[in-house]
Image (spheres, grey):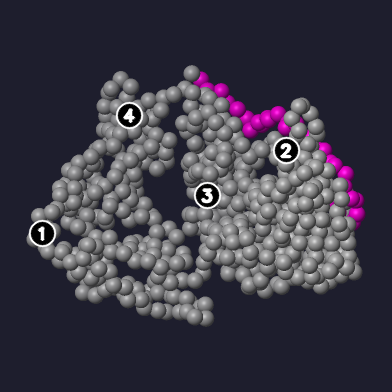
Amino acid sequence: MRKKRLSTGLWIPAIPVVLVLGAMFFSPSCANTTQAPSGGKKDTIPPVIVGIKPLPGATGVPVHNARISFTFNEYVTVKEPKNIYLSPPLERAPKYKMRGKTLTVWFESDLQENTTYTLDLTGAIADNNEGNMYPGYTMSFSTGDRLDSMAVTGTVLDCNTLQPVKGATVLLYRDLADSAVFSHRPDASVKTDDWGFFALRNVPDAEFRLYAIQDEAGNNIYDADNDKLAFIDTVLRPTLVVSDTLPELLKYDMKDTLHCQARRAEHELYMFRDQTSKQMILNKERTSDRTAYVTFMAPDAKIDSLWIRGIPSRNLVLQFNDQRDSLEIWINDRRRMPDTLHVFVDYLKTDTLGQLSPFTDHLRLPRAGGKTNARTARRTLKHEDTLCVLTAKAEPETVEQKGFVLEFAQPLINAAFDSLILRSVNPRQQESIMKYRVEKDTANLRVFRVHPEEALQAGYEYFLKIPHRRFRDINGFWNDSTEVRVSLPNDDKLSSLHLDLSGVSNKYIVDLLGEKRDQVLRSFVVESDQVLVFPYLKTGKYSIRLTEDLNRNGRVDTGNYSERRQPEKVKFYKLRDGTYIINIPESTEMEQKIDVAKLFGN
């Protein structure tokens, strides 16, 4: 069956939307609310505010025992108390009580003098009968003689998926010190909506630093151990003036895609899990007689030397993981090991002043299970305990890119890769021996890749046999024979995607993801213009993510606030219709051209 070819032009139908605004008190300090249309027998109309005391925009509000009352046109209930949100936030969250149709909000802590506050009810109130949520309302008032009149808008996105982060707490600080976000509450704050959008309204005309956190403790202060963080690199000064006609300050139904996406975001913040800069040994364990590991609190541990008492350094095999925060240790020595290994690590450790300084840690690693009798240990050995353990695998979707992957449980001291047997079987069951090349994985000394030198063909079966006693690990054990089989699909319904990359002037990681962007299906690392092929794709929706690998380490790095370093820049390929979703039908060879330099604005 001949496959059809598609161009990059994809089309989706327009999404019907309805925007219904309910009128409310219109003043320079008041935001509009929304009201859903009525229809059908069921009551779908959310409640409406019919009275507020004091009025929006009030000045001279007392700092002690301040109370704000909202009267609705029907009986309501507070469904989400945490969504009654005051900015600037106080030490304690606002309190509330219901009496009839009136909600009264008060504050246990005194307000600050000469300060403009905003009180937001978005997502907090529902009617008593049908549970229809009140879309939202924000009012401003001041304890001084005037209202601040500036505003700041933006969006908060996940740094890896670029999906909006809902419910993030956006923080605005007049204290420009880096430590402010750790030490005290902000001068203004707000929660992001379903689209990750925020509008900080009625803030002073002053210089600020802007942050966003996933505030797990709900205290409006950044906790590096538990919260994710986003920040902008520069000091900002608001340029927007608060107005009831400003679309960014209006309240919309979150299903109103047209109007929600039309709002202008002045700032984009990319949320990430901060890499702690505090470095020390976090954990250590002896996993067997001759193996152990050491983990570090922060990545990129800098080790000067590591030695074990009584073991020559030449007999040690060491390997860091990709993040350099976990170190594996193997002892290539046939002598009986002591009950406790004394490991000494010279590395840069964070001192009491927060600086990296040379330090030697003495680690005591007892044998798992305590002392053992050598004769008893030999009697309890099983056959599988005396093997050079390996796993061999090959996936139809990636074998042409990654080959057959051999991973050994322990480092090798003898390897006969020329003894491997690679053969193919065609649909007529005719067999032939194939040539191959072996590539050592650059990140893992126990992993090897076997690549056929001939092009693989759909419908063929391929077998890689690892003969008996050809590989020996540092324990002195030989391997058993094993064979791995892979078949290239011959399904006419499968499709392929060809990415023609141009403008590649740096190192980039190119990932094929599913529609939800939560799983990497295929991945390439590129440094030059080329065509990437993603074969054997099932009918479905996919996304293409590109990450600019500025430090050229071949992995996606998160940010580091203490170093004022943002996460590595991520972009999703956008189609001509403005979407990020590539809809791949069956039996299709699809081509996409991506100008990488243009995509990243280089």
The kind of residue on which mark 2 rests is Asn
Task: Indicate which label's residue lies in the foreground, 1 or 4.
Answer: 1
Give above or below for 268 relative to 2. Answer: below
206 or 407: which is nearer to us?
206
Q: How far apart in space, not on screen, are marks 4 and 2 (Cα)?
A: 64 Å
Q: Residue 129 has which mark?
A: 2
Which residue in the protein does label 1 denote? 376
Please give left or right for residue 446 compared with residue 135 in the image: left
> SS for tag 4?
strand
Which residue in the protein does label 4 denote? 461
Q: Quadrant of residue 96?
A: bottom right
What x and y, as percent, mark residue 371?
18, 66
Which residue in the protein does label 3 denote? 509
Q: How many marks?
A: 4
What x and y, as percent, mark residue 176?
70, 72
Residues rendered magenta in the picture: 2-31
